[in-house]
Amino acid sequence: MSERKTFKRGDEVTWHTSQGDTHGTVTRKITGTESAGGHTAKASEAEPEYEVQSDKTGRKAIHKPSALRKRGSA
């Protein structure tokens, strides 16, 4: 049984893209249907997703918690 990952606004995270690992910040928790970065999230309170903003480009995207890793926690 795996523990569910949770994040909050301001958390610094890393996620994988086709260009390699990307770093950014969680801007908000998504609990409904929303779009960002060409992805439509169909999230809920029970299965939230997170909007993140890239440090490098400033672009926003929405990711499932399983795709995100907190930075700075060794």
Image: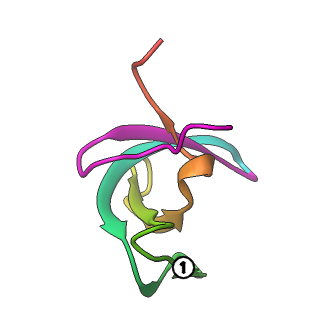
Label 1 is placed on what type of residue?
Ala
Residue in the picture at 61% in, 48% down = 66
Residue in the picture at 53% in, 52% down = 65
Residue in the picture at 55% in, 37% down = 3
Seen in the image, is 59 located left or right of residue 10? right
Q: In this view, does 33 lie above or below 65?
A: below
Q: Where is residue 6 in the image (x, y as percent from the top left)?
A: 41, 46
Q: In this view, does 2 lie above or below 64?
A: above
The magenta-colored residue range is: 1-18
Residue 15 inside the magenta-drawn segment: yes
Seen in the image, is 47 located left or right of residue 8? right
Indicate the quadrant containing the N terminus: top left, top right, bottom left or bottom right: top right
Q: Is residue 70 above or below residue 31?
A: above
* Residue behind mark 1: 41
Query: What secondary structure predominates along the stretch shown in magenta?
Result: loop
Residue in the picture at 44% in, 39% down = 13
Query: What is the secondary structure assignment of the residue under circle 1?
Result: strand
Residue 51 can be seen in this image: yes
Residue 55 can be seen in this image: no
View extreme (front): residue:
1
Q: Position of residue 56 (x, y in %)?
A: 43, 47
Pick the front one: 49 or 21: 49
